[in-house]
Amino acid sequence: MWRLWFFFHEMAFGLLSVFLPLYIITIGGSLLEIGILSAVALFLAIPASFFWGYICDKTRHYKRYILISFFASALFLYLFTLSTNVTLLIVLYAMMSILHVAHEPPKNVLIAELYSRKDWEKSFAFYEGFTEIGWLIGLVLGFFMSAYGFSAVSELVLCSGLNLIAFITSLILVTDPLLIFERGLVNIEKTIEFASKGIVIASRILDGLSTDERLKRENLRAFCIGLVLFSISTSILFTPLPIFFSKELALPTSMVFAIYALNSSGGVLGYFLVSKKSIQQTEKFQISRIALFRSILTFLLAGVTLIPTYNVILAIIILILMGFVYAFFIVYTLSLSMELIPAGKAGLFNVLLGIGGACGSFIGPFIAQAFGFTCVILTASVIFFFAYVSFKIFA
């Protein structure tokens, strides 16, 4: 039941994910200003993620930072209704992002500490799948509100209200864990396992026996670089994508919401499937394949404009598959990050994604405005491929 607070939060930000870039264009903004809005917010969220990750582990209190995040989101989204000045909206959105990310490290730690290591993947998958349904419902709400002509103010008030409900729900349901030890136990187990493997290999060599085993630790730097590259390419692609559907494919706003809802549906299916699998021993080998598959899917997306008759159908199929594989990616990397990143640095995972997201959210709209959407898609595909190479090195 404690996950219920995130359901309403994700409903709000699901709606906002498509609404906001289209709204900025509607009130006279440009693609470049959309990029600036996203990039500034994400860059400011990077040190904030470090801070929130450090302070929640330092104080061993997690609920209070979740409450700060949801209340701040409700307040700032309401303030959005008071002005149509693009510069002011950029400032408000940037300020909101600093407080909004306060919930991310505590949420990851809560899941890691409330469940044993063997259940992390299933627990993260269930959480992500549950909240992805909230995101999907938010997109469906956006579809109907756009189709029936609701005003932009009404949509922003709804987003604010949903975050207020998330605040009230978390106030009632969320409690801090009594003991914080699971991540520490996992690190001890990894050290013992590594030492044991080294002793076995050394014994075989001293006995004159051949061995094909190698003593190798995971390459944490390659894992971090892969996360950043994957996040950059995702943000390059998805930040200007609503405008691509709206302008290049000439689709109405309600149809753009519908396409994103189908993308989210693919994610829900992916989370459901990954929660049913036992993948603790294979996850680090799968993430490189996922990055490669995203690269191929993104490259295929570049061809939709060349087939006018079926371009919308092809785009929908590709986005559903993207949502499906992203579900596996986020569960695998979240579980690995809780294992690889020490206590006190729980915010590092969100920092790495934030660095990539901040860079990509500016680069994507800039390339779209300067060189066109096809160049955006091809650039994202190439960077996904480099993420594949980095994850291969990590594994």
Image (tube, helix red, strand yellow):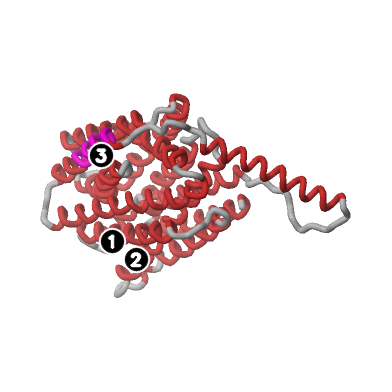
Q: Residue furthest bottom?
A: 309
- 10 Å crowding of disc 3: few (<14), some (14-19), many (20+): many
Identify the residue shown where x is 48% and y is 35%. 346
Q: Which residue is mark 1?
A: 259
- 10 Å crowding of disc 1: few (<14), some (14-19), many (20+): many
Instruction: Answer whether residue 94 is visible to the viewer in this image.
Output: no
Q: Which residues are magenta?
A: 160-172
Q: Earlier in the sequence, mark 2 or mark 3?
A: 3
Secondary structure character of the magenta stretch overall: helix
Q: Which residue is mark 3?
A: 166
Residue 186 occupies which quadrant of the picture? top right
Say if 51 sits above or below 230 in the image. Answer: above
Residue 390: x percent and y percent? 58, 51
- Residue type for callout 1: Ile
Contact flag, marks 1 and 2 (Cβ < 8 Å) = yes
Identify the residue shown where x is 43% and y is 67%. 300
- Residue type for callout 2: Ala
Q: Which residue is mark 2?
A: 315
Viewer-closest of 234 and 70: 70
- Residue type for callout 3: Ala
Viewer-closest of 27 and 274: 274
Q: CA distance from mark 1 to mark 2?
A: 8 Å
Q: Earlier in the sequence, mark 1 or mark 3?
A: 3
Say if 98 sits above or below 275 in the image. Answer: above
- 10 Å crowding of disc 2: few (<14), some (14-19), many (20+): many
Instruction: Answer whether residue 350 is visible to the viewer in this image.
Output: yes
Residue 76 occupies which quadrant of the picture? top left
Name the front one of labels 1 and 3: 3
Name the front one of labels 2 and 3: 3
Residue 39: x percent and y percent? 38, 40
